[in-house]
Structures are given as structure tokens and as C-alpha cells.
Image: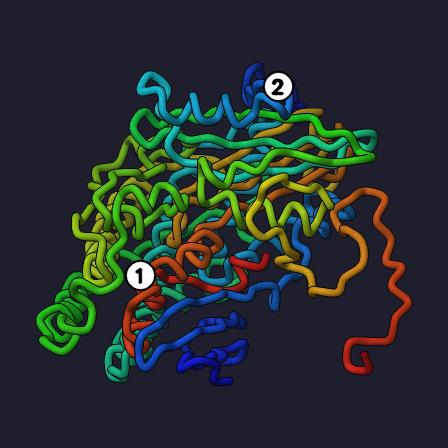
Amino acid sequence: MNFEITKKENSFDKIYIGSNELCELLKFLKNNPEYDFDRLNTIIAIDLDDKFEVIYDLHSTNTGQMRRISVLVDRNSPHVPSVVDIFKSAYFDECEIYDLFGITFDKNPDLKRLLMPRGWLGHPLRKDYKQEDERLSWSER
Amino acid sequence: MQTNNKLKINIGPQHPSTHGVLRFVLELDGEIIKSCEPVIGYLHRGMEKMAESRTYLQYLPTVDRVDYLGGFFNSYAFCNAVENLAQIEVSKRSRYIRVLTLEMNRLSSHLLWLGSYLLDMGATSPLFYTLRDREVLLSLFEELTGQRLMYNYYTFGGVRHDVWADWLKKVADFVEIMPRKIQDYEDIITNNPIFATRTKDIGILSKHKALQYSITGPNLRASGIDLDSRKDANNLIYDELDFETKIAHSGDSFDRYMVRIEEMRECLKIISQCVNWLMGNEGDVISPVKQPTLKVPEGEFISNVEAPRGICSCYVKSDGSGKPYRVKWRTGSYYAVQLLPKLLEGTFYPDMMAIFGSLDVIAPEVDR
């Protein structure tokens, strides 16, 4: 049987924004009653080979709307401002992204590795990641 | 280790009440918890990295392992994202079968939670009652899919095979006797004064805090926020079914228990409606898509499903090849673990498991 596969339009809208305006925009979207995005569903990071993309998935529990804010980050010095003071749930997300992608979140209260062991080398979800840890095994360290 | 009257103790990673491998570092002053630090990652299996080196079909059986008590929900979240990206239509009968199995899965998950929560607090008998009833559900799943926990039953565009009249009859029989069993649980648990004193006004989660920490599912509904993503347009047929979202208002451990008990009753309502529809209607469920060679057009999609432990989101980005470019899982327990230190601060140490158990955290979902 033949099956038509086409791309649906607007299935995943996102707003691109510079990292210096991020906090201001999120604060506005959260506090303005017209938008009322009171919950940060999750933060998604993607390795786009030449740069990183960080997507903030916002949700309004009153209207049921979801919006995505996207920030493009330079690969050589990946920095994004932390949004922990706006949404407290972002703390674990930011630590996870730091752990798996090596993106630093400025002003995060305590950025640390979360899922990988404390002494791990490298950031596994980067596309160019190779396991190059030649130290002794965990039991011999 | 003792410093200035404060005692630092370690709980886990191997501990019967942590439901998996989860560790806490507690700081106690006498019996009062001063601080709590959750340490996670012991069950990290790299589910997201794994997706990037497998085709869509090869990855599908592994997604059930994200949350082993709600395999259908993870499977659905991933299938739904791929179906949206590739514009695959799902037949109505498949959607009914999906809702039927999802709700049965929710019921079995809540039953296990109920038994183990009471066990955490020292009541051993409810575990035997709930596992007895959960066993019926697991046997039904085994008959349908061949597996008791890791079902791998959904495919892109449908389900693996149709349900049959004999099986539906067994589900209908189960639905008929189950309300009495739930009443039995209520009689021995809800009205039990010891249970009430241990859970009422313990671990109060305010509306504001719940939203700040992105808590979803029954935990959020127990704090008085009516958020149920089943009601939103979701590619399933929940809008054709008659059910209510139960909420409670005080946000303590007791309310979280009550919300789940009421949710079990709503599950039964949905299951019986689905069974009736499936008995009276015919339809095709086998997907026309060639699964092993499925190529998904370039794009990205995030699909949300109301899992037993809160909203489960699966983000899929495709670059047009046969393998996903990036998959990201968002699960309810991850945020519940993050919230836990805030709920524990200043409470008594014996209340810890009455609070932690009521959040219904399971570790594989936290670490992925």
C-alpha cells in the first residue's frame, strides 16, 4: 500500500531569541496574565554540529497552551543564562544539560554532574563524543 | 558522621523504600530533617544516546524501559511523536485499543503504588490485596502482548494485532468485580485512624510550589490544580469518553492517596466504555507503514501523555534519515525527586517515607 508522508505545518512552533533577552522574555511570559505560562515543562538541548540549541518548553496550566522558546548557543564557549530564579524546576534540567552537553548556565546556584558519575570525562550526548577515559576502572581508582 | 549536634546519614542506593536505586543524604538534628540531598544517576542507561544509533523500529522496544510500571505510556509517547512527524494516520479501532491498554496500565501502576506505599509505612496486608488484583491485569497483558511489563505492543500507526472477543470478555469480568475490591481497600485503609494520622497534614504541597517545581499528574491534582492532559486534543479518543478528573485541595499525603484511589475508579469507567465500543465495532488495526524501513521527514515534535506519575513528554527530532537525530524524555518522577528536599525540610524523620512514598517516584524514570 502506498503511504503519503508529508510534513505537517506549524506542528512545532518555536520562537528564536538571543540568550541575553531570554530571562526577560520568560519573566514577561510568566507574569503577564495575557500569556500566563506558569510551568516550565522541560528544557531540551540539541547538538546541531556547528552550534547547540536549547529549547524551553513552556506550558500554561490555565489555557493549556504550550510555547517553545529557542536559544542558539555558540559551540566553542557554550553559555546560557540560568532561569532557576524564574522557574525552580529548571535546576535539575540545567544540571542534566551541563552534564550531557557541557553547556554552562551562568548564575546557576550549584551546577554539577547529575546523571553521569562525578569524575566522568566529556559530555556523552555531544555528537562528537568518544569514550576516551583511560584511567583505571572504578573499582581500582 | 556527627558535627555540631547534626547527624549526617545516608539512605540508599539499595533501600527497600526507594523503589529502585536512589540515594538520599540527610542531615538530622535529633529527629528533625534539616536538609536532604537526592543523589540520582544509578540507573542511567543512556536511553537518549541509544536512540541516535538505532532505527525507529529498533528503538521502539527499549522505550518501555523508561518507566517499567507504565510501559504503554512511554511506547505511546514515542509512537505519537513519530506518527505526527511522519503524518501517519491511526485508525479509530487502534485508538480505542490504545486507550483501553493505557488505562489498564494506569490501574496496575496505581495498584502497585498503593500496596508498596502502605508497606513503606509498615502496613503489610494491603500489599497482598493489591498485588492479587494487579496479577489479573498482568495476566491479561501477558495474554494480549506476550509480556507482563515490557509490552512492545504499539507500532507506528497502530497496534501489533487486534484484540479478540474472549479477551475482552475477561476484561469486562475484571471491571465488574474491581469496584468492590477498591471499596475493600478504602474500608481497610481510608478509614484506618493510624493511616490517617500518619498522612494527614504531612508533606503539604502548595499550588504555587507545585507549579514552580513543574509537578504534574496526581501530585499536582492533589494540590487543587485541574490539569489533565488527557482532556486536551491528544490523538487519542478521550474526548468521546465519559470520565472526570478528580482533584483534592489540601495537597498533603492523604490527598495524594485519595486522588489516586478516585483515579482508579475513573480508569474502570474508561475501560468499560472502551470494551463496549470494541465489542460492538469492527475495524482495521494493522498499520500500513513498512516499519523496518520507516523514514521520517525532517522536523521535530514533542508529544505529551498523562502517565501515572505525571506528564510524560517525548521529544523527537528527525533529520530525514532512518534514525532519530535526538530523543528527549521528560518524566514526572524526575521533578518529584527535585521537589522532595523542599517537602522534607523541618519534618520528622519517621515522616520521610510517608511523604516520599506518596509522590510515587520510581527510579528508572528519574535516571532514564
Residue B266, given in percent of the width and then of the height, sits at 22, 49
Residue at position x 84%, y 49% from top? Answer: A129
Give a yes or no on whether discs 2 and 1 share a subunit.
no
Tell me the amino acid under the disc marked 2. Answer: Tyr
Residue A18, given in percent of the width and then of the height, sits at 64, 20
Residue at position x 39%, y 24% from top? Answer: A65
Nearest the eye: A138 or A8? A138
Q: Are marks 2 and 1 in contact (CB under 8 Å)?
A: no
Which chain's residue wears label 2?
A: A
Which chain's residue wears label 1?
A: B
Can you see residue A4? no
User: Which mark is drawn over residue A16?
Assistant: 2
* Foreground label between 2 and 1: 2
Q: Answer with left or right where residue B308 lies relative to residue B325.
A: left
Residue A61, given in percent of the width and then of the height, sits at 33, 32
Tell me the amino acid under the disc marked 1. Answer: Lys
User: Which mark is drawn over residue B170?
Assistant: 1
Dot 2, crowdedness within 10 Å: few (<14), some or many (≥20)? some
Dot 1, crowdedness within 10 Å: few (<14), some or many (≥20)? some
Identify the element where label 1 is drawn: helix
Q: Is residue A46 above or below residue B108?
A: above
Nearest the eye: A26 or B134? A26
Can you see residue B367? yes
Q: Answer with left or right where residue B238 lies relative to residue B245.
A: right
